[in-house]
């Protein structure tokens, strides 16, 4: 029994959702929306301290909670969440509009290693909706442009319609010392970017093995083959950080659902050094 | 260890006094009681409520109680339940929410349990070790759990050192017993006619002051040493932990997981009876009119088909996947997570498995044919 137990009431309030108002809603597709959320209680925002890569439990009273990564910058007042409608709780969220109230508790989890990445060249490799957990990190680096080296963004989608927020990718393309490469493996006639898997984009960028930090998020097979392709190009797995997804219920490391090998994805992740989970990656059914 | 503490003698006839003193101090007194051919923790009003003269026979998938032919109060080693339900409630409300409508403002309040003082008679060393593990999970990790903390604070634990074991016990292999070394308020060893008793905490000392007992005789303490030593020596089950966690991490694809999956019913009995398993579900339970909702936490099991379900994808769809998750977590990744094995050697998962799967044998089988 430790001293920490003395503050049960305050500890309990940490687990209670705060009220947030939807101040802006943008739709990328019928089932993908971005929400900007503002705390009704300004004091709640002041003690809400996060870094990109962390997530919130977004709550619909009477329905349930979902874990959603934070896409906005820590300096912005509002929190941005990009939400895909896939189940009961997100189904209700999809019907809400500007002015509606949601619940939210957080922030939880381990962010991208944005301190370690300072002064280094950063390579970002994402697939499909795997871009959502990294958007905040990319914006974060461009907002603090002098602190980071070359930022290279490689993003792959299956079909052209899967590419959301193209405007953001175009904005990044205009940043100094940055490059953005988009690819699609089942393109339609209108697709003007690269064709093929995201790993084929590695031949398009100039890789500098000595300085890279790699942020990766996407389907497991993509992460496995991208990590292998990087190793072939002299970039060690030790520089690779990935954001992983598992079933999350409590977000504070008690409920057991999000375990992945020795990691609780909710607190040891979602962002983990690839090396830490490498022995488990690619093993089916873990 | 034992000799560092003052040892006193509690006559068998004075056990009721101990129960009554605890009750007078404001504790609800619980202990092992016989129900439906097994043992459950329930309220003890008189010593006669305890399973006097009974003993348990346990083996893989088998549990029975029978007369022991003696008058021992704590002859039964254990039943399916442990201290877990007293600190980590099988089902409890976390937050109460008042709802005005979709997208409308709401109010949410935590529902911490009322502090209660509960004394438990007859706690075994393995279960004290399990409680210490649960403390690490719920109190000493990044986020302390307030609901657990309130319940944990009110516990007074009267340990009983084991002088007999059953065939499923392997506490000596897990180094948790048969003698309770820490984490108790009072520690008893039952001998013919009474108990050697020691305080393990200031709260325990205060209770002993009320009882004003004589010192234990040298003969009683010698007999106690002999009984504890023979219990440890006679424990049949040995389990080699020397190559854990590496053995399991290196054999995630071992064919033994398919073999055990053919026998496993994925019922979750092992996780429900395990004194350290902490998996739980959290969900909203709205009222019929939708005006209020309760965030409920309820024990869950990694054997549940939906345990690793995310939208459009189940990470552990096969029984093989789920058995592996349980075994590798309990005996390997737990060590990485909390600096201790998740197993205390109580043997409940073996006894209460309807098909008698024994994780110590499964791990031995993997070891014999390791990659």
Image (cartoon, grey):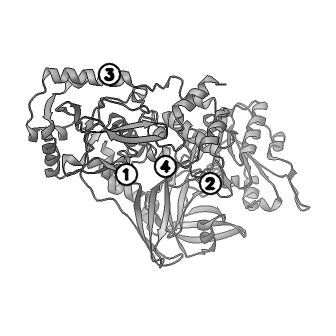
Closer to the camera in the image, B39 or B158: B39
How far, Cα to Cα, is label 1 from label 4? 27 Å
Label 3 – label 2 distance at C-alpha: 48 Å
Gap in angstroms between the C-alphas marked 3 and 4 = 36 Å
Mark 4, Cα crowd under 10 Å, few <14 / some 14-19 / many 20+, is some
Give percent across and percent down for residue B78: 36, 40
Q: Residue at x 56, y 36 (%)?
A: B328
The residue beneath circle 4 is B279
Q: Quadrant of residue B322?
A: top right
Whether discs 1 and 2 lie on one chain: the answer is yes
**Residue labelled with disc 2:** B309
Q: Residues within 10 Å of mark 1 (few under 14, many from 20)?
A: few
Give the distance between the C-alpha atoms of the residues marked 1 and 2, in whole angstroms: 36 Å
Are discs 1 and 4 less than 8 Å apart at CB?
no
Find out whether the residues at labels 1 and 3 contact each other: C-beta distance under 8 Å.
no
Residue B39, given in percent of the width and then of the height, sits at: 35, 46
Disc sitting over residue B36 in the figure: 1
- Give the mark, 3 or 2, whose residue is nearer the N terminus: 3
**Is label 3 on the same chain as label 2?**
yes
Q: Secondary structure at mark 4?
A: loop
Subunit of mark 3?
Answer: B
Instruction: Tell me: A28 left or right of B270.
Output: right
**Residue positioned most to the right:** A189
Going from N to C along the chain, the mark reached first, 1 or 2, is 1
Q: Give the residue number, with chain letter if any, for mark 3.
A: B230
Mark 1 and mark 3 on one chain: yes
- Which numbered mark, 1 or 3, is in the foreground of this view? 1
Separation of marks 4 and 2 at Cα, in angstroms: 14 Å
Helix, strand or loop at disc 2? strand
Among the two numbered marks 1 and 3 on one chain, the one whose residue lies closer to the N terminus: 1
């Amino acid at each position: 029994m430790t001293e920490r137990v003395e503050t049960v009431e305050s500890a309990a309030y940490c687990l209670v959702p705060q009220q947030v108002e939807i101040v802006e809603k943008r739709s990328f597709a019928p089932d993908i929306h971005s929400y900007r959320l503002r705390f009704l209680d300004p004091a709640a925002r002041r003690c809400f301290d996060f870094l990109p890569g962390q997530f919130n439990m977004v709550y619909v009273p009477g329905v349930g909670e979902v874990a959603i990564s934070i896409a906005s910058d820590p300096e912005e007042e509002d929190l941005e969440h990009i939400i895909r409608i896939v189940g009961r709780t997100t189904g209700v969220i999809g019907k809400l509009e500007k002015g509606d109230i949601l619940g939210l508790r957080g922030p939880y989890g381990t962010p991208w290693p944005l301190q370690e990445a300072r002064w280094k060249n950063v390579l970002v490799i994402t697939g499909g909706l795997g871009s959502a957990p990294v958007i905040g990190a990319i914006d974060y680096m461009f907002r603090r442009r002098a602190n980071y080296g070359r930022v290279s963004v490689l993003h792959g989608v299956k079909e052209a319609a899967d590419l959301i927020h193209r405007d953001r990718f175009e904005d990044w393309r205009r940043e100094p010392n940055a490059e953005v490469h988009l690819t699609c493996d089942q393109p339609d006639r209108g697709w003007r970017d690269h064709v093929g898997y995201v790993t084929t984009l590695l031949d398009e960028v100039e890789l500098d093995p000595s300085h890279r930090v790699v942020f990766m998020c996407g389907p497991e097979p993509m992460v496995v083959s991208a990590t292998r392709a990087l190793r072939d190009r002299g970039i060690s797995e030790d520089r690779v950080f990935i954001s992983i997804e598992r079933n999350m219920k409590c977000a504070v490391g008690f409920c057991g659902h999000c375990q992945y090998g020795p990691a609780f994805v909710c607190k040891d992740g979602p962002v983990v050094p690839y090396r830490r989970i490498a022995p488990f990656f690619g093993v089916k059914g873990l | 260890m034992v000799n560092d503490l003052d040892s006193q003698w509690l006559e068998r006839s004075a056990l009721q006094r101990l129960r009554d003193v605890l009750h007078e101090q404001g504790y609800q007194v619980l202990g092992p009681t016989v129900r439906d051919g097994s043992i459950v923790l329930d309220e003890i009003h008189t010593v006669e409520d305890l399973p006097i003269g009974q003993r348990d026979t346990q083996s893989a998938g088998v549990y029975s109680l029978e007369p022991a032919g003696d008058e021992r109060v704590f002859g039964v080693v254990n039943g399916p339940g442990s201290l877990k339900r007293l600190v980590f409630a099988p089902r409890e409300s976390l937050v109460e929410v008042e709802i005005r409508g979709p997208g409308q403002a709401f109010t949410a309040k935590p529902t911490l349990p009322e502090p209660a003082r509960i004394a438990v008679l007859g706690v075994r060393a393995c279960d004290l070790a399990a409680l210490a593990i649960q403390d690490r999970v719920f109190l000493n990790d990044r986020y302390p759990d307030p609901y657990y903390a309130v319940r944990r604070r009110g516990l007074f634990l009267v340990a009983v050192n084991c002088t007999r074991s059953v065939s499923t016990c392997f506490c000596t292999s897990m180094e948790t017993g048969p003698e309770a070394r820490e984490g108790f308020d009072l520690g008893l060893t039952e001998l013919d006619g009474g108990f050697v008793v020691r305080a393990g905490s200031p709260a325990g000392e205060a209770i002993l002051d009320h009882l004003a007992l004589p010192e234990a005789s040298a003969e009683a303490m010698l007999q106690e040493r002999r009984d504890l030593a023979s219990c440890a020596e006679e424990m049949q089950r040995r389990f080699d932990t020397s190559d854990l966690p590496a053995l399991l991490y290196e054999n995630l694809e071992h064919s033994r997981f398919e073999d055990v999956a053919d026998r496993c019913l994925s019922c979750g009995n092992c996780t429900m009876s395990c004194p350290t398993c902490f998996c739980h579900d959290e969900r909203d339970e709205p009222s019929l009119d939708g005006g209020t909702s309760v965030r409920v936490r309820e024990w869950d099991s990694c054997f549940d088909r939906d345990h690793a379900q995310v939208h459009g994808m189940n990470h552990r769809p096969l029984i093989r996947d789920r058995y592996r998750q349980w075994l590798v977590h309990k005996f390997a990744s737990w060590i990485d997570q909390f600096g201790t094995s998740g197993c205390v050697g109580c043997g409940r998962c073996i006894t209460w498995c309807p098909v008698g799967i024994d994780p110590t044998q499964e791990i031995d089988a993997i070891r014999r044919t390791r990659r």
